[in-house]
Each structure stands twice: as C-alpha cells, then as structure tokens.
Image: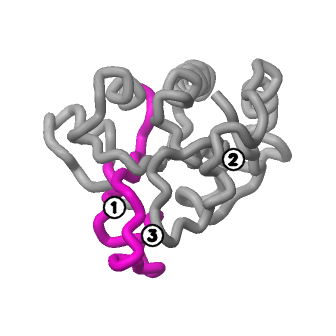
Amino acid sequence: MRFSKIKDNDIANGLGVTMSLWTQGCPHHCKGCFNGETWDFDAGEEFEDSDLEYILENINKNNVHRDLSILGGEPLCPENVDGVIEVCKIFKEKFPEKKIYLWTGYVVEQFNEKQRNVLNYIDVLVDGPFVQAKRNLSLMMRGSSNQRVIDVKKSLDENKIVLFQD
C-alpha cells in the first residue's frame, strides 16, 4: 500500500478531531475530485510498519481524543485494500473504543469478498463515487448527494444499510 500523507489533526473528515491516513492511487478519477494528487499509483510513499507505529503512538497525542479517518486516493482498490485492512485490524485491536471512518468510491453492495472484510473493523463508511453534478458542500462527510454515510455496525447487525446518525 502507498500513502499520500498522514494528517495528525483533521477536523474536515469525520466528527470531531481525527487522524487521517490518505492512501495513494485511485482508479476512479472522478470529475471534480478535490484530491486528484492522490490518483497516481506511483506517487506518495510506501506505507511501512513505522508509519503504522506513528499512528498508534500519536492517536492520543496531547490528550486529544482522535478517531481515525482513511481516505484517498482509493483505500479499497486492489493495490491498497490489504494494507488498509491490516491498519484497521491492528488499530481496532489496540483502540476498540475509537471510530474508524473510511471513504471509498466503490458502493458497498458491489464490494468483493476482500473489500467486505474491512467492514469487520470500520464504524462509518462513506461510499460511492463523487459526482460533480450532485455536488453539495452542505452534506455531512460527503461531497455529492449520491454518496451515503453508513453506520457499519448497525448495518451488519440488521443485515441492511443503516445510515449514520451523529
């Protein structure tokens, strides 16, 4: 897995303060994407054990409650999905009380088996591609009205899509 950046204190992605991991590489190339610099699969850096250690050691830095946001790029593309699942698994084992937010251009109903595995670890999923014609900056945690903010745990429990309510 490659990544673009880790942002320690992010107030734009998730509720409250999050630490954000921006994966590198995206196959979707949505028109109007605000983060086109993350499209190139050869850019960014290889995600190493030391990067995961940085996240784990700094998530509570200065006694600020932070959750984890994973964006991109595309976290769930074949090039990134294994690394993202590993990060989520290790993070949840160490911090089960913290939320993991994940943004993907894929739609959850069309996830393959590997992509579905991430649902075991994340709390909130924003799915669907950004559609410029449906752009709406007043929406919570999403850029276009076709995207959904899904409460993953409730969705798994109820075996249907349950939208996240803050």
Mark with earlier residue (3, 2): 2
Mark with earlier residue (1, 2): 2
Estimate the spatial distance between the alpha carbons at disc 1 and disc 2, rounded to whole Å.
22 Å
Q: Is residue 20 above or below residue 36?
A: above
Left or right of 6? Residue 128 is left
Residue 44 visible: yes
Residue 66 visible: no
The image's mark for residue 147 is 1
| Quadrant showing the C terminus | bottom left
Where does residue 86 sit, x and y in percent of width and height?
A: 56, 20
Residue 103: in magenta span: no
Which amino acid, by three-letter code, is at mark 1?
A: Gln
Question: Foreground: 68 or 76?
Answer: 76
Where does residue 9 sit, x and y in percent of width and height?
A: 75, 55
Residue 149: in magenta span: yes
At x 78% / y 28%, what residue is drawn?
51
Q: Is residue 113 above or below residue 142?
A: above
Estimate the spatial distance between the alpha carbons at disc 3 and disc 2, rounded to whole Å.
20 Å
Which amino acid, by three-letter code, is at mark 2?
A: Met
> Which range is magenta?
121-150
Indicate which label's residue lies in the foreground, 1 or 2: 1
Which amino acid, by three-letter code, is at mark 3?
A: Gly
The image's mark for residue 19 is 2
| Quadrant showing the N terminus | top right
Where does residue 128 sit, x and y in percent of width and height?
A: 34, 54
Estimate the spatial distance between the alpha carbons at disc 3 and disc 1, rounded to whole Å.
8 Å
What residue does disc 3 label? Answer: 143
At x 66% / y 48%, what residue is drawn?
20
- Which picture quadrant has residue 91? top right
Left or right of 143? Residue 117 is left
